[in-house]
Amino acid sequence: MFMDAKLTFNSAFGTPQAISATADSAGIIDITGAGSGNAPAMINGFPATNTSIGEDYGAGDGVAIPHVYVNVTTAGTGAGTVAISVAAAPDNGSYGQGTYTTLVSTPGLVGTTLVLGSIIDIQLPPIRYTLGEALPRFYKLIYTVTGSATVSVLANLVLNPQQSLESGLYSNNYIAV
């Protein structure tokens, strides 16, 4: 697995986000790299103009499946819960963020169960859309805190995190019948 500094949900690559109340991720991933409110550098069509683009990160190619890889950097506290949702939005026509739609959410995770170094792996599902709809350009996380819970995390969009490959491993001396 490789981590890319442009695919982080934190304010800066390697800078954990402290979560103690419901909030959006500090970083928003713009798949064009231009940033919200800026026209992408890609030129498409005739006459040559910048156009709104998007991509279904959840589609993958069958082998390289995108995941949100959340690493707990400070042990969680409190009996409350933290749920993590992945949301996506298309370009609003002015190169800004359109309306976000939640793609997938974790169940509420009790603060004290989020031990230092634990990993929360969220596989991105393919987006269900119809012809003519805009694909997402922006991706963010939504941390929903219920009760009293705190934790600090690093969150990145990655391909094939290590633990996603472990399901195909077998123990020694496996007997094939």
Image (cartoon, helix red, strand yellow):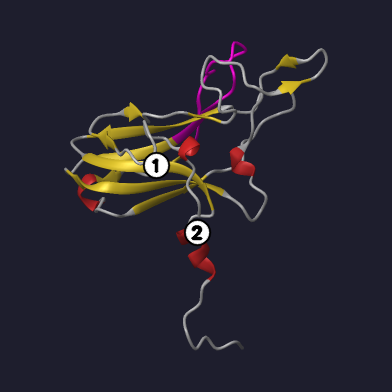
Q: What residue is rendered at 44% in x and 37% in y?
A: 8
Secondary structure mainly formed by the magenta segment: loop
Kindly state the secondary structure of the residue where label 1 is placed. Answer: strand
Counting labels gives: 2
Classify mark 1: residues with Cα within 10 Å, few (<14), some (14-19) or many (20+). many
Q: CA distance from mark 2 to mark 1?
A: 16 Å
- Considering only order in the chain, which callout, 1 or 2, is on the residue closer to the N terminus? 1
Q: The magenta stretch spans which residues?
A: 86-103
Q: For this view, does 24 lie left or right of residue 62?
A: left
- Give the quarter of the image for residue 85: top left
Point 47% across, 60% down: residue: 162
- Position of 66 with respect to 27 (left or right) is right
Residue 155's disc number: 1
Q: Note whether 153 is above or below 20 in the view shown.
A: below
Give residue 177's position: percent from left, percent from top: 61, 88
Mark 2 belongs to which amino acid?
Ser
Q: Would residue 99 be counted in the magenta stretch?
A: yes
Q: Amino acid at mark 1?
A: Ala
176 to 10, vertically: above or below: below
The percent position of residue 134, horizontal first and vertical second, equals 66, 23
Residue 69: x percent and y percent?
A: 43, 47
The secondary element bearing badge 2 is classed as helix
- Identify residue for label 2: 164
